[in-house]
Amino acid sequence: MAKEINLLNEQSEESGAEKKLKQRINILSPIILLIYAVLVIGIFSYSLLQTAQASDLKKKIKNTENSIQQMSETESFLRGSKIKLAAVNTVLAQNVDYAQTIARLKEITPEELNLTAMILGGDRSVEVSYRVLNSDLVAGLINNLLNPQIGGKYFEKVKLKNLAFSKDGFYIISLTFAAK
Amino acid sequence: MTLFMNKRLIRKYRAYLLPVVVLLLIIWLSLQIVKPKIESIVRLDNEMKLSRMKLEVLLKKANALSVLDPIQLKDMFDTLNTAIPSDKDIPGFMLGIGRAAQEASVSVGLVEVSPGSVSTSSADKIDSKKSITPVTAKVTVRGTFANIISFVSKITNGRRLLKIEGINLSGAGAQRVNEQLSMVFSILVYYQPLPESLGEISLPIVNITDSEEKDFLMLRNFPYYSFIGSQDINTSSSSVQSGTVPVGKADLFNR
Protein backbone atom coordinates (compact mmCIF):
# COMPACT_ATOMS: atom_id res chain seq x y z
CA MET A 1 0.00 0.00 0.00
CA ALA A 2 2.82 2.30 1.00
CA LYS A 3 4.47 1.54 -2.27
CA GLU A 4 1.36 2.66 -4.12
CA ILE A 5 1.41 5.99 -2.24
CA ASN A 6 5.06 6.47 -3.24
CA LEU A 7 4.20 5.79 -6.81
CA LEU A 8 1.46 8.37 -6.79
CA ASN A 9 3.91 10.95 -5.43
CA GLU A 10 6.46 10.26 -8.18
CA GLN A 11 3.70 10.47 -10.79
CA SER A 12 2.51 13.80 -9.49
CA GLU A 13 6.13 15.15 -9.51
CA GLU A 14 6.59 14.03 -13.15
CA SER A 15 3.33 15.60 -14.08
CA GLY A 16 4.56 18.90 -12.76
CA ALA A 17 7.73 18.88 -14.89
CA GLU A 18 5.78 17.63 -17.84
CA LYS A 19 3.17 20.31 -17.33
CA LYS A 20 5.87 23.00 -17.45
CA LEU A 21 7.35 21.47 -20.57
CA LYS A 22 3.96 21.13 -22.17
CA GLN A 23 3.18 24.74 -21.31
CA ARG A 24 6.44 25.95 -22.80
CA ILE A 25 6.07 23.85 -25.88
CA ASN A 26 2.53 25.00 -26.37
CA ILE A 27 3.60 28.62 -26.12
CA LEU A 28 6.73 28.22 -28.23
CA SER A 29 5.11 26.24 -31.02
CA PRO A 30 2.86 29.02 -32.30
CA ILE A 31 5.73 31.48 -31.87
CA ILE A 32 8.03 29.26 -33.96
CA LEU A 33 5.25 28.84 -36.51
CA LEU A 34 4.80 32.58 -36.58
CA ILE A 35 8.53 33.18 -37.02
CA TYR A 36 8.60 30.55 -39.71
CA ALA A 37 5.62 32.14 -41.43
CA VAL A 38 7.35 35.53 -41.32
CA LEU A 39 10.46 33.90 -42.76
CA VAL A 40 8.44 32.28 -45.55
CA ILE A 41 6.70 35.56 -46.28
CA GLY A 42 10.12 37.20 -46.35
CA ILE A 43 11.42 34.61 -48.80
CA PHE A 44 8.39 35.05 -51.04
CA SER A 45 8.65 38.83 -50.87
CA TYR A 46 12.33 38.65 -51.78
CA SER A 47 11.48 36.30 -54.62
CA LEU A 48 8.83 38.72 -55.92
CA LEU A 49 11.26 41.60 -55.65
CA GLN A 50 13.92 39.55 -57.40
CA THR A 51 11.53 38.61 -60.20
CA ALA A 52 10.67 42.26 -60.68
CA GLN A 53 14.37 43.16 -60.76
CA ALA A 54 15.05 40.36 -63.25
CA SER A 55 12.26 41.55 -65.49
CA ASP A 56 13.57 45.12 -65.23
CA LEU A 57 17.05 43.88 -66.10
CA LYS A 58 15.70 41.95 -69.07
CA LYS A 59 13.90 45.07 -70.26
CA LYS A 60 17.12 47.09 -69.96
CA ILE A 61 19.07 44.43 -71.86
CA LYS A 62 16.41 44.35 -74.57
CA ASN A 63 16.46 48.16 -74.88
CA THR A 64 20.24 48.24 -75.04
CA GLU A 65 20.24 45.44 -77.61
CA ASN A 66 17.74 47.40 -79.67
CA SER A 67 19.88 50.51 -79.55
CA ILE A 68 22.93 48.42 -80.58
CA GLN A 69 20.84 46.89 -83.37
CA GLN A 70 20.05 50.39 -84.59
CA MET A 71 23.78 51.05 -84.79
CA SER A 72 24.52 47.71 -86.47
CA GLU A 73 25.53 49.47 -89.68
CA THR A 74 28.24 51.36 -87.80
CA GLU A 75 29.34 48.12 -86.16
CA SER A 76 29.45 46.26 -89.47
CA PHE A 77 31.58 49.01 -91.03
CA LEU A 78 33.92 48.93 -88.04
CA ARG A 79 34.18 45.15 -87.97
CA GLY A 80 34.58 44.97 -91.75
CA SER A 81 37.29 47.62 -91.60
CA LYS A 82 39.10 45.71 -88.84
CA ILE A 83 39.06 42.52 -90.92
CA LYS A 84 40.28 44.33 -94.00
CA LEU A 85 42.95 46.20 -92.05
CA ALA A 86 44.32 42.94 -90.65
CA ALA A 87 44.50 41.61 -94.21
CA VAL A 88 46.13 44.85 -95.42
CA ASN A 89 48.74 44.52 -92.71
CA THR A 90 49.48 40.92 -93.71
CA VAL A 91 49.86 41.79 -97.40
CA LEU A 92 51.95 44.90 -96.78
CA ALA A 93 54.30 42.92 -94.54
CA GLN A 94 54.81 40.34 -97.29
CA ASN A 95 55.54 42.84 -100.04
CA VAL A 96 58.98 42.91 -101.57
CA ASP A 97 60.32 46.17 -102.94
CA TYR A 98 61.36 44.95 -106.39
CA ALA A 99 62.15 48.42 -107.67
CA GLN A 100 64.67 48.79 -104.85
CA THR A 101 66.19 45.37 -105.54
CA ILE A 102 66.63 46.24 -109.22
CA ALA A 103 68.09 49.64 -108.36
CA ARG A 104 70.61 47.94 -106.05
CA LEU A 105 71.39 45.39 -108.71
CA LYS A 106 72.15 48.24 -111.12
CA GLU A 107 74.42 49.78 -108.52
CA ILE A 108 76.71 46.76 -108.33
CA THR A 109 76.71 45.74 -111.99
CA PRO A 110 79.75 46.79 -114.08
CA GLU A 111 78.84 48.79 -117.16
CA GLU A 112 80.02 46.30 -119.76
CA LEU A 113 77.87 43.50 -118.40
CA ASN A 114 74.74 42.69 -120.36
CA LEU A 115 71.79 41.29 -118.49
CA THR A 116 70.14 38.48 -120.43
CA ALA A 117 67.79 37.00 -117.85
CA MET A 118 66.50 37.96 -114.44
CA ILE A 119 64.17 36.14 -112.07
CA LEU A 120 63.05 37.87 -108.90
CA GLY A 121 61.14 35.79 -106.40
CA GLY A 122 58.64 36.73 -103.74
CA ASP A 123 60.99 35.09 -101.22
CA ARG A 124 63.56 37.81 -102.11
CA SER A 125 65.57 35.40 -104.22
CA VAL A 126 67.34 36.82 -107.26
CA GLU A 127 68.63 34.92 -110.26
CA VAL A 128 70.49 36.83 -112.95
CA SER A 129 72.25 35.82 -116.15
CA TYR A 130 74.75 38.03 -117.91
CA ARG A 131 76.61 37.94 -121.17
CA VAL A 132 80.17 39.16 -120.72
CA LEU A 133 83.07 39.67 -123.02
CA ASN A 134 85.90 38.89 -120.62
CA SER A 135 86.40 36.99 -117.41
CA ASP A 136 87.62 40.07 -115.52
CA LEU A 137 84.13 41.49 -115.65
CA VAL A 138 82.74 38.25 -114.21
CA ALA A 139 85.25 38.45 -111.37
CA GLY A 140 84.39 42.13 -110.92
CA LEU A 141 80.69 41.38 -110.54
CA ILE A 142 81.28 38.55 -108.07
CA ASN A 143 83.70 40.72 -106.08
CA ASN A 144 81.11 43.49 -105.97
CA LEU A 145 78.47 41.08 -104.75
CA LEU A 146 80.68 39.67 -102.03
CA ASN A 147 82.17 42.97 -100.89
CA PRO A 148 80.43 43.91 -97.62
CA GLN A 149 80.73 47.60 -98.53
CA ILE A 150 79.12 47.24 -101.96
CA GLY A 151 76.87 44.24 -102.74
CA GLY A 152 77.18 42.62 -99.32
CA LYS A 153 75.06 45.45 -97.88
CA TYR A 154 72.09 44.40 -100.00
CA PHE A 155 72.61 40.79 -101.00
CA GLU A 156 73.59 37.53 -99.37
CA LYS A 157 73.90 33.79 -100.08
CA VAL A 158 75.65 34.43 -103.41
CA LYS A 159 76.01 31.31 -105.55
CA LEU A 160 77.48 30.88 -109.00
CA LYS A 161 74.83 28.79 -110.70
CA ASN A 162 76.40 28.45 -114.11
CA LEU A 163 79.40 29.72 -116.07
CA ALA A 164 79.70 28.94 -119.76
CA PHE A 165 81.82 30.15 -122.63
CA SER A 166 80.04 30.44 -125.96
CA LYS A 167 81.39 29.99 -129.47
CA ASP A 168 81.04 33.71 -130.22
CA GLY A 169 83.51 34.52 -127.45
CA PHE A 170 81.11 35.51 -124.72
CA TYR A 171 80.96 34.28 -121.15
CA ILE A 172 77.47 33.45 -119.95
CA ILE A 173 77.23 33.64 -116.19
CA SER A 174 74.27 32.82 -113.98
CA LEU A 175 74.21 33.86 -110.34
CA THR A 176 71.72 33.34 -107.57
CA PHE A 177 71.53 35.35 -104.37
CA ALA A 178 69.02 36.72 -101.93
CA ALA A 179 68.09 40.31 -101.23
CA LYS A 180 68.49 41.28 -97.58
CA MET B 1 -8.84 -2.28 -21.37
CA THR B 2 -6.98 -1.31 -24.57
CA LEU B 3 -9.45 1.49 -25.21
CA PHE B 4 -8.93 2.74 -21.72
CA MET B 5 -5.15 2.65 -22.20
CA ASN B 6 -5.44 4.51 -25.52
CA LYS B 7 -7.60 7.20 -23.98
CA ARG B 8 -5.04 7.59 -21.22
CA LEU B 9 -2.23 7.86 -23.75
CA ILE B 10 -4.14 10.38 -25.83
CA ARG B 11 -4.89 12.42 -22.75
CA LYS B 12 -1.22 12.22 -21.75
CA TYR B 13 0.20 13.26 -25.13
CA ARG B 14 -2.59 15.61 -26.25
CA ALA B 15 -0.49 18.56 -25.20
CA TYR B 16 2.24 17.52 -27.67
CA LEU B 17 -0.17 17.50 -30.57
CA LEU B 18 0.25 21.18 -31.45
CA PRO B 19 4.07 21.19 -31.44
CA VAL B 20 4.11 18.01 -33.53
CA VAL B 21 1.62 19.48 -36.00
CA VAL B 22 3.69 22.67 -36.13
CA LEU B 23 6.88 20.69 -36.68
CA LEU B 24 5.30 18.56 -39.38
CA LEU B 25 3.83 21.66 -41.04
CA ILE B 26 7.23 23.36 -41.00
CA ILE B 27 8.89 20.27 -42.46
CA TRP B 28 6.22 19.90 -45.14
CA LEU B 29 6.29 23.60 -46.03
CA SER B 30 10.07 23.57 -46.11
CA LEU B 31 10.24 20.61 -48.44
CA GLN B 32 7.34 21.46 -50.70
CA ILE B 33 7.45 25.23 -50.95
CA VAL B 34 10.40 26.89 -49.26
CA LYS B 35 13.17 24.66 -50.62
CA PRO B 36 12.09 24.98 -54.30
CA LYS B 37 11.58 28.70 -53.79
CA ILE B 38 15.07 29.11 -52.34
CA GLU B 39 16.49 27.07 -55.21
CA SER B 40 14.69 29.26 -57.72
CA ILE B 41 15.97 32.37 -55.90
CA VAL B 42 19.55 31.09 -56.08
CA ARG B 43 19.11 30.19 -59.76
CA LEU B 44 17.57 33.55 -60.61
CA ASP B 45 20.27 35.28 -58.61
CA ASN B 46 22.96 33.57 -60.71
CA GLU B 47 21.07 34.44 -63.88
CA MET B 48 20.81 38.03 -62.75
CA LYS B 49 24.54 38.16 -62.07
CA LEU B 50 25.15 37.05 -65.65
CA SER B 51 22.48 39.44 -66.94
CA ARG B 52 24.07 42.33 -65.05
CA MET B 53 27.43 41.48 -66.59
CA LYS B 54 25.81 41.22 -70.03
CA LEU B 55 24.06 44.55 -69.53
CA GLU B 56 27.35 46.14 -68.53
CA VAL B 57 29.01 44.80 -71.68
CA LEU B 58 26.08 45.90 -73.83
CA LEU B 59 26.00 49.38 -72.32
CA LYS B 60 29.74 49.71 -72.88
CA LYS B 61 29.29 48.60 -76.47
CA ALA B 62 26.33 50.91 -77.05
CA ASN B 63 28.30 53.85 -75.63
CA ALA B 64 31.34 52.99 -77.74
CA LEU B 65 29.21 52.69 -80.87
CA SER B 66 27.36 55.93 -80.21
CA VAL B 67 30.58 57.97 -80.31
CA LEU B 68 31.68 56.47 -83.65
CA ASP B 69 31.01 58.34 -86.85
CA PRO B 70 29.20 55.99 -89.26
CA ILE B 71 29.96 58.17 -92.29
CA GLN B 72 33.67 58.18 -91.55
CA LEU B 73 33.63 54.42 -90.94
CA LYS B 74 31.75 53.81 -94.17
CA ASP B 75 34.32 55.86 -96.03
CA MET B 76 37.09 53.84 -94.38
CA PHE B 77 35.42 50.54 -95.19
CA ASP B 78 34.79 51.54 -98.82
CA THR B 79 38.43 52.51 -99.23
CA LEU B 80 39.63 49.28 -97.65
CA ASN B 81 37.20 47.31 -99.77
CA THR B 82 38.88 48.71 -102.86
CA ALA B 83 42.25 47.54 -101.50
CA ILE B 84 41.10 44.04 -100.64
CA PRO B 85 37.65 43.51 -102.12
CA SER B 86 35.17 41.04 -100.70
CA ASP B 87 34.91 39.27 -104.05
CA LYS B 88 37.60 38.43 -106.57
CA ASP B 89 36.91 41.48 -108.76
CA ILE B 90 39.05 40.13 -111.60
CA PRO B 91 37.74 42.66 -114.14
CA GLY B 92 38.75 45.43 -111.74
CA PHE B 93 42.21 43.93 -111.41
CA MET B 94 42.63 43.59 -115.18
CA LEU B 95 41.48 47.13 -115.77
CA GLY B 96 43.82 48.28 -113.00
CA ILE B 97 46.78 46.53 -114.63
CA GLY B 98 45.84 48.13 -117.95
CA ARG B 99 45.63 51.60 -116.45
CA ALA B 100 48.89 51.25 -114.52
CA ALA B 101 50.59 50.01 -117.70
CA GLN B 102 49.18 52.96 -119.62
CA GLU B 103 50.53 55.39 -117.04
CA ALA B 104 53.93 53.67 -117.02
CA SER B 105 54.04 53.61 -120.85
CA VAL B 106 54.36 49.86 -121.11
CA SER B 107 52.16 47.52 -123.07
CA VAL B 108 50.41 44.59 -121.49
CA GLY B 109 50.87 41.53 -123.64
CA LEU B 110 48.88 38.95 -121.80
CA VAL B 111 47.03 38.74 -118.53
CA GLU B 112 46.32 35.19 -117.45
CA VAL B 113 44.12 34.72 -114.42
CA SER B 114 42.66 31.54 -113.03
CA PRO B 115 39.98 32.88 -110.73
CA GLY B 116 38.05 29.64 -110.32
CA SER B 117 34.46 30.49 -109.65
CA VAL B 118 33.78 33.94 -111.04
CA SER B 119 31.76 35.38 -108.23
CA THR B 120 32.11 34.45 -104.59
CA SER B 121 28.66 35.70 -103.80
CA SER B 122 26.84 33.71 -106.45
CA ALA B 123 29.06 30.75 -107.23
CA ASP B 124 30.98 29.95 -104.11
CA LYS B 125 29.91 29.63 -100.52
CA ILE B 126 31.84 32.29 -98.67
CA ASP B 127 34.24 30.85 -96.15
CA SER B 128 34.60 33.71 -93.72
CA LYS B 129 37.00 31.71 -91.55
CA LYS B 130 39.58 31.89 -94.29
CA SER B 131 41.76 34.85 -93.50
CA ILE B 132 42.85 36.13 -96.88
CA THR B 133 42.66 34.43 -100.21
CA PRO B 134 44.78 35.11 -103.29
CA VAL B 135 44.05 34.56 -106.95
CA THR B 136 47.10 33.90 -109.09
CA ALA B 137 47.66 35.95 -112.22
CA LYS B 138 50.41 36.07 -114.81
CA VAL B 139 50.98 39.37 -116.53
CA THR B 140 53.32 39.87 -119.47
CA VAL B 141 54.49 43.42 -119.96
CA ARG B 142 56.60 44.95 -122.72
CA GLY B 143 58.47 48.19 -122.46
CA THR B 144 61.80 49.76 -121.69
CA PHE B 145 63.54 48.65 -118.52
CA ALA B 146 62.92 52.00 -116.84
CA ASN B 147 59.23 51.95 -117.76
CA ILE B 148 58.80 48.39 -116.54
CA ILE B 149 60.33 49.39 -113.20
CA SER B 150 57.90 52.30 -113.10
CA PHE B 151 55.08 49.82 -113.79
CA VAL B 152 56.28 47.62 -110.92
CA SER B 153 56.32 50.62 -108.65
CA LYS B 154 52.82 51.64 -109.75
CA ILE B 155 51.19 48.27 -109.19
CA THR B 156 52.91 47.65 -105.87
CA ASN B 157 51.97 51.11 -104.67
CA GLY B 158 48.44 50.95 -106.05
CA ARG B 159 45.39 50.78 -103.82
CA ARG B 160 44.37 47.25 -104.89
CA LEU B 161 46.73 45.17 -102.84
CA LEU B 162 48.65 42.47 -104.61
CA LYS B 163 51.92 40.69 -104.19
CA ILE B 164 54.38 40.15 -106.99
CA GLU B 165 55.44 36.55 -106.44
CA GLY B 166 58.06 36.69 -109.13
CA ILE B 167 59.42 38.68 -112.02
CA ASN B 168 60.87 36.86 -114.96
CA LEU B 169 62.91 38.56 -117.63
CA SER B 170 64.36 36.23 -120.16
CA GLY B 171 65.68 36.34 -123.69
CA ALA B 172 67.03 39.87 -123.43
CA GLY B 173 69.95 40.39 -125.73
CA ALA B 174 72.71 42.87 -125.25
CA GLN B 175 70.85 45.65 -123.50
CA ARG B 176 70.73 48.96 -125.23
CA VAL B 177 69.19 52.12 -123.92
CA ASN B 178 65.40 52.15 -124.47
CA GLU B 179 65.41 48.64 -125.83
CA GLN B 180 62.02 47.00 -125.43
CA LEU B 181 62.03 44.14 -122.96
CA SER B 182 59.39 41.62 -122.10
CA MET B 183 58.81 40.69 -118.47
CA VAL B 184 56.46 38.18 -116.96
CA PHE B 185 55.01 38.92 -113.55
CA SER B 186 53.50 36.28 -111.29
CA ILE B 187 51.04 38.18 -109.18
CA LEU B 188 48.87 37.23 -106.24
CA VAL B 189 45.68 39.28 -106.23
CA TYR B 190 44.00 39.29 -102.85
CA TYR B 191 40.36 39.29 -101.88
CA GLN B 192 38.69 38.61 -98.61
CA PRO B 193 35.10 37.60 -98.11
CA LEU B 194 33.39 39.16 -95.14
CA PRO B 195 31.48 37.19 -92.52
CA GLU B 196 27.78 36.88 -93.27
CA SER B 197 26.66 38.08 -89.85
CA LEU B 198 27.98 40.22 -87.04
CA GLY B 199 27.73 37.32 -84.61
CA GLU B 200 26.68 37.65 -80.99
CA ILE B 201 25.29 41.06 -80.14
CA SER B 202 27.25 41.05 -76.88
CA LEU B 203 30.55 40.64 -78.72
CA PRO B 204 32.63 43.66 -77.74
CA ILE B 205 33.73 46.08 -80.42
CA VAL B 206 37.40 46.59 -81.02
CA ASN B 207 38.42 50.03 -82.14
CA ILE B 208 40.86 50.85 -84.89
CA THR B 209 44.38 50.97 -83.47
CA ASP B 210 46.91 53.67 -84.26
CA SER B 211 49.00 51.39 -86.47
CA GLU B 212 45.87 50.35 -88.39
CA GLU B 213 44.94 54.01 -88.79
CA LYS B 214 48.43 54.61 -90.15
CA ASP B 215 48.06 51.74 -92.65
CA PHE B 216 44.70 53.11 -93.72
CA LEU B 217 45.99 56.64 -94.24
CA MET B 218 48.87 55.28 -96.31
CA LEU B 219 46.52 53.14 -98.35
CA ARG B 220 44.09 55.99 -98.93
CA ASN B 221 46.83 57.97 -100.62
CA PHE B 222 47.65 55.12 -103.00
CA PRO B 223 46.19 55.64 -106.49
CA TYR B 224 43.33 53.35 -107.38
CA TYR B 225 43.66 51.95 -110.86
CA SER B 226 40.24 50.48 -111.38
CA PHE B 227 36.63 51.29 -112.21
CA ILE B 228 35.82 53.36 -109.18
CA GLY B 229 37.95 56.38 -108.44
CA SER B 230 39.15 56.52 -112.01
CA GLN B 231 37.23 58.15 -114.81
CA ASP B 232 33.53 57.51 -114.74
CA ILE B 233 32.30 54.99 -117.20
CA ASN B 234 29.33 56.26 -119.13
CA THR B 235 26.92 53.47 -118.42
CA SER B 236 24.06 55.06 -120.32
CA SER B 237 25.82 54.69 -123.64
CA SER B 238 27.37 51.32 -122.83
CA SER B 239 26.15 48.52 -125.00
CA VAL B 240 26.93 45.90 -122.39
CA GLN B 241 24.36 47.18 -119.96
CA SER B 242 22.34 44.39 -118.52
CA GLY B 243 19.34 43.56 -120.66
CA THR B 244 20.26 45.82 -123.59
CA VAL B 245 22.30 43.32 -125.61
CA PRO B 246 20.25 41.51 -128.24
CA VAL B 247 20.19 37.84 -127.35
CA GLY B 248 19.05 34.58 -128.97
CA LYS B 249 21.75 33.43 -131.42
CA ALA B 250 20.42 30.87 -133.87
CA ASP B 251 23.76 29.34 -134.85
CA LEU B 252 26.47 29.58 -132.21
CA PHE B 253 29.30 28.93 -134.72
CA ASN B 254 28.19 31.47 -137.30
CA ARG B 255 29.37 35.05 -137.27
Image (spheres, helix red, strand yellow):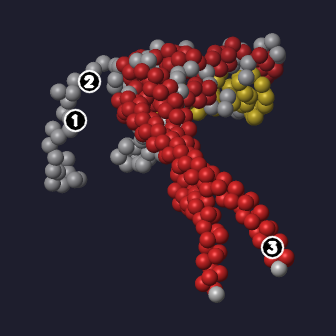
Asked whether, in this view, residue A124 is left or right of residue B168, the answer is right
Residue at 38 percent of width and 29 percent of height: A67
Q: Earlier in the sequence, mark 2 or mark 1?
A: 2
Residue B98 in sight here = no
Q: Residues within 10 Å of mark 3 (few under 14, many from 20)?
A: few
Residue B164 location (% of width, % of height): 56, 30
Residue B152 location (% of width, % of height): 53, 22
Which disc is residue B240 wearing? 1
Residue closest to the far front: A1
Task: Name the residue that disc number 3 marks.
Answer: A5
Provide the chain ID for the residue under circle 2.
B
Task: Name the residue that disc number 2 marks.
Answer: B233
Residue at 69 percent of width and 13 percent of height: A107
Tell me the amino acid under the disc marked 3: Ile
Asked whether, in this view, residue B252 is left or right of residue B185, the answer is left
Tell me the amino acid under the disc marked 2: Ile
The mark closer to the camera, 3 or 2, is: 3
Which disc is residue A171 wearing? none
The CA span between labels 3 and 2 is 129 Å
| Residue sitting nearer the eye, A75 or A132 | A75
Q: Quadrant of residue B35?
A: bottom right
Q: Quadrant of residue B65?
A: top left
Provide the chain ID for the residue under circle 1.
B
| Residue sitting nearer the eye, A58 or B249 | A58
User: Element type at marker 2?
Assistant: loop
Residue at 79 percent of width and 29 percent of height: A157
Residue B238 location (% of width, % of height): 20, 30
User: Element type at marker 1?
Assistant: loop
The CA span between labels 3 and 1 is 129 Å
